[in-house]
Image: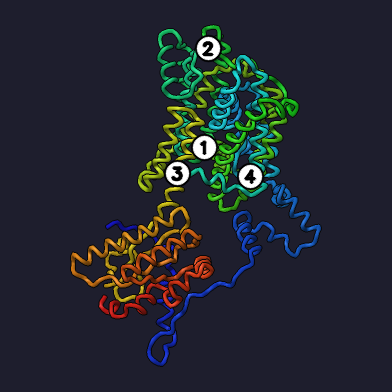
Amino acid sequence: MPRTVSDGGEALDAEIASRTSSHRRTDNGHQPGYKVGFPPKKRLIDEFTDAVKETFFADDPLREYRDQPRYKKVLLGLQHIFPVLDWGRHYTFRKFRGDFISGLTIASLCIPQDIGYSKLAGLLPQYGLYSSFVPPLIYALMGSSRDIAIGPVAVVSLLLGTLLQNEIDPNKNRDEYTRLAFTATFFAGVTQAALGFFRLGFIIEFLSHAAIIGFMAGAAITIALQQLKGFLGIANFTKKTDIISVMKSVWENVHHGWNWQTILIGASFLAFLLVAKYIAKKNKKLFWVAAIAPLISVIISTFFVYITRADKHGVVIVKYIKRGINPPSANLIYFTGPYLTKGFRIGVVAGMIGLTEAIAIGRTFAGMKDYQIDGNKEMIALGTMNIVGSMTSCYVATGSFSRSAVNYMAGCQTAVSNIVMSMVVMLTLELITPLFKYTPNAILASIIISAVLGLIDYHTAYLIWKVDKLDFLACLGAFFGVIFSSVEYGLLIAVAISLAKILLQVTRPRTVLLGNLPRTTIYRNIDQYPEATLVPGVVIVRVDSAIYFTNSNYVKDRILRWLRDEEERQQEQKLQKTEFLIVELSPVIDIDTSGIHALEDLLRALEKREIQLILANPGPAVIQKLRLAKFTELIGEDKILLTVGDAVKKFAPKAVESV
């Protein structure tokens, strides 16, 4: 027979068992028993208030404001919005030293990456640099993570570029395309800030970890394939992102579209970048080798192209990056017209993906350094920086895992490292951008390929396969959806499979058969504990989920099937007929009217078989609703016991003695 394991809610059995050894006995030698308690009835407004508080304010954010004078409340409010006012008071030169080194290190990594990522988004190179200047400054004031490095990232850039190009051709309508990018960035920020302000951050949890792993891996391969255009020097390349279209385009250009000088540059520096990453991985103290390798590659390749004039032999170069810091762009955002809806839709999708990536990165490094980050505060910070960014010629920025890892290993102490990085980017925009004129696109492609390879986490994928096959299906579905269709369809598949898993778990909860552990009053899953024995004439079933309208009929039918299987076994082995069915309700945290109706149907079905229904250890919410529905009167309060052991001892004392 199928058996599963879950121990939710049964710690009370062990506690009762330990107490009874020292508890005073009554005159007749029996231990005094406890009855199931009924919680005090709450007013409707109290129930509603408690539900809202637990859903949206589980962390009790107002606790530090209690019993504080008005000026203190104002100060705490400002510190909540701008955490820099709190940690800035304790900032020291020693911390600045670590932040300064970290900021310089991630700046050397972000500058070449930003130029490449902006091309990935279909934007001019300077917009990538703009997005690493303003947003990090805003985040440093409002963010709660000490380690996250802010800027454009590969996955969001690809997603944004794909969605934008579905609406506007950047080659034909460059200005409209850029304006739509700013519009999408604005609404991405509004989405992120709104989720944080209304404390709706739990929405992003619907995208499972497994689905994110698959989505990221698929996006990494898609991004790498897109770089074949610059890596091979192909002029006419497909605009589609699926692997079949890309490989077909590569193959069609193999005889006349490839440029050997471009391939030589790209392959040489890709090998250099991969070797640098390998060295840094083997020796953590040499992390800086991988961090500065992209900038060194850009400098050397640019110098090489300049002295050889390889651009006259088919090597495509960046040509021109606009000099100067971010120009204002608030007047370029579409607040009316047909592009408003399109920008909103694209912004919501890009904002959610950026938010998911940033929160995951922030939590990862916060766990490594043993400090807490406020998820809702992070959302407001990320949203604000993208809203401000959209008005200063930036596109969607978020936390970068590769740069955050370098930031962490470089010894960052606070978000000041983002400020240092931002200042270096500002100096680059003001002074150095003309020097990127001869930078070959091949080197940018190599940098992006080497960066996105780290997004393919095959170790975690293999672990998911070993632990949970359904999770692996979600991972696989997201992965194949991205590489064989598109980024947005891969994302849709990831969300759909994640929701399908939730629905499956909600509609098909586990039920298990319990047996008695020898010489104890403890009852456990007979599959987990083979030594546990079934009690003659008694079937004990535990339901491992809340009972709602989505699963109530299944729970009832599954309990009756357990009963039917036991009756068949009893007939085959000529054992004592079942007289009692005990349903252990410890893990059942809640029940609705459909669940109560299913229990009523179960009771009627058992009465026809002359089997008594016993309930064990219902929780406060469950017993309260059973009482209000008068089910306790229907079954009899004497048949609702504190533990399974009490139920067996009361209704089948001879059976328990024979076990």
Per the image, the residue denoted by label 3 is 500
Per the image, the residue denoted by label 4 is 195
Amino acid at circle 3 = Ala
CA distance for labels 2 and 3? 49 Å
Mark in the foreground, 1 or 4: 4
Amino acid at circle 2 = Val
* Quarter of the rendering occupied by the C terminus: bottom left
Mark in the foreground, 2 or 3: 3
Per the image, the residue denoted by label 1 is 287
CA distance for labels 4 and 2? 46 Å
Amino acid at circle 1 = Phe
Tell me: 614 left or right of 293. left
Mark in the foreground, 1 or 3: 3
Q: At which x and y percent is residue 288? A: 54, 35
Q: Secondary structure at mark 3?
A: helix
Tell me: 72 left or right of 355. right
Q: Secondary structure at mark 1?
A: helix
CA distance for labels 1 and 3? 41 Å
Q: At which x and y percent is residue 139? A: 67, 40
